Amino acid sequence: MTAQHRAPLMLALGAIALLSTGCVAADGTTTVPKITIGVDSASSSGDVSSGIQLIALLTVLTLAPSILVMVTSFTRTVIVLSLVRNALGLAQLPPNQVLIGLSLFLTLFVMTPTLKAVNEQAVQPYIAGTITQQEALSRAEKPMRAFMYKQTREKDLALLVYLAKEERPRTLADVPTYVLIPAFITSELKTAFQMGLMIFLPFLVIDLAISTILMSMGMMMLPPAMVSLPFKLLLFVLADGWHLIVRSLVLSFG
């Protein structure tokens, strides 16, 4: 047995020995550990309310990544940045961690006015105890709905209203949230791909030009992507590409 295989075996034997030692009583008899899970009676209605609020908070924290992706500017931002990387022909540069991190901070930057309104209108009054939890949720929903409604196309909203068999809304307040969210996501996907298409076009021209030149020179065995990559990077650097992309992304939410 090699040293590589001996180490895991020794660790397993050591763990078994520790468990066996812990299960031996003072008189030498072997005991089995007891694990109990119980539910005690609540002394007041406040204990029940606190428990329910804790469960609701854990549920919200579990769904927080989905909420962040669906109702903020994160979707458009991360798609555009990913398409930029694909347009450059770089498979792993910038890394996924960098793209997601930049998308998160740009999302925070874009959503700051909305989050500030939620904090002032809902969170702080609820912490101060001047409003109920239900009223706080209602107040927090209004700034988020206003942001989503501003970025949603009327065509997408009309489609979801029709599919939901709802009456034609006259104002923003008449649009149900469960209709507004998918309409917002659909609009975000379309906008992101439109921006990605505009980014792809100049790099596509470079790829076509390099491929044509290599074919005319009879260098068919040389991958065009290997030759075009330095030229695409040069164009991107000279045009200050990251500055233009970040500027366009932020202004697109104006």
Image (spheres, helix red, strand yellow):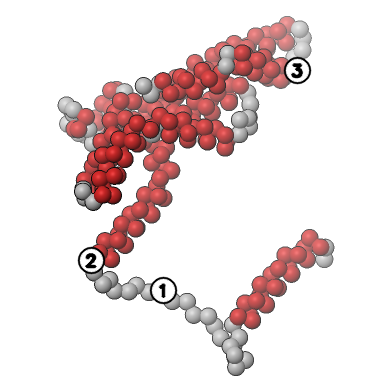
Give the quadrant of residue 122: top left
Q: Is residue 71 left or right of residue 142?
A: right
Picture coordinates of residue 225 (x, y %)? 68, 19
Q: Residues within 10 Å of mark 1 (few under 14, many from 20)?
A: few
Separation (CA) of disc 1 from disc 2: 22 Å
Query: Which residue appears at 49% of the width and 23% of the height?
Result: 246
Which amino acid type corresponds to the residue marked 3 in the rendered image? Leu
Residue marked by disc 2: 45
Query: Which residue appears at 23% of the width and 36% of the height?
Result: 176
Which amino acid type corresponds to the residue marked 1 in the rendered image? Ile
Give the quadrant of residue 73: top left
Q: Nearer the viewer, mark 1 or mark 2?
A: 2
Verify CB contact (< 8 Å) between mark 3 and mark 1: no
Residue marked by disc 3: 222
Separation (CA) of disc 2 from disc 3: 76 Å
Residue 165's place in the image compared with 251, above or below, is below
Residue marked by disc 1: 37
Callout count: 3
Q: Secondary structure at mark 2?
A: helix
